[in-house]
Amino acid sequence: MKLARITAGAVLALRISYGVALIVAPRRLALRWLGPAADDVPVQVALRALGARETVLHTGALAAAINGRPLRPWLAASAAGDLTDVIATAIGRRRLPRGSTPATLLVGGGAAVASVTLAAAVDA
């Protein structure tokens, strides 16, 4: 297996772990991002849905990596999801905790860049 696929597999496993953690403990993972709103049950519903998206998408990608199937479509979907998180945070920035928007740009934007970089390296 090529190094790029092994690296992608490791990144995907981390993303699956993050998704599961969002499902299990949404408040804990989102408090710095969303502030007190992370305590609200309706917000936790959306966070768990985000966790499910992360888990399902990245599990599919990991299966593709393991089975030698194309990864680019999965990684493109991952990058798109990360960018929607950044955009949604930017739109709601006035009501979010101070520092939340730059942190989301750094983490979500960085994750999108990582996915695009991996997509360029795999299946080449």
Image: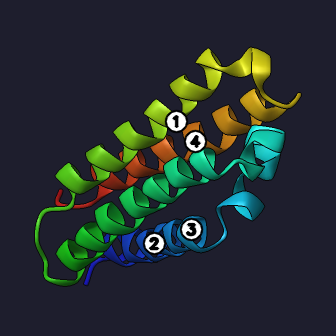
Q: What residue is pinned by disc 1?
A: 85
How far apart, in angstroms, are the residues tagged by discs 1 and 2?
17 Å
Residue at 78 percent of width and 28 percent of height: 96
Residue most extreme to the front: 41
Q: Evaluate if marks 3 and 2 touch, with contact meaning CB atoms under 8 Å apart.
A: yes
Q: What residue is pinned by disc 4?
A: 108
Q: Earlier in the sequence, mark 4 or mark 1?
A: 1
Q: Earlier in the sequence, mark 1 or mark 3?
A: 3
Q: Residues within 10 Å of mark 2 (few under 14, many from 20)?
A: many
Residue most extreme to the left: 69
- Label count reads 4
The quadrant of the image that shows the C terminus is bottom left
SS label for mark 3: helix
Q: Amino acid at mark 3?
A: Tyr
Image spot of residue 17 (x, y percent): 53, 75
SS label for mark 1: helix
Foreground label between 4 and 1: 1
Q: Residues within 10 Å of mark 4 (few under 14, many from 20)?
A: many
Residue 50 horizontal side relative to residue 37, left or right = left
Q: Evaluate if marks 1 and 3 touch, with contact meaning CB atoms under 8 Å apart.
A: no
Q: Residues within 10 Å of mark 1 (few under 14, many from 20)?
A: some
Residue at 52 percent of width and 23 percent of height: 87
Q: What residue is pinned by disc 3?
A: 18
How far apart, in angstroms, are the residues tagged by discs 4 and 1?
7 Å
Foreground label between 3 and 4: 3
Q: Evaluate if marks 4 and 1 touch, with contact meaning CB atoms under 8 Å apart.
A: yes
Q: What residue is pinned by disc 2?
A: 16
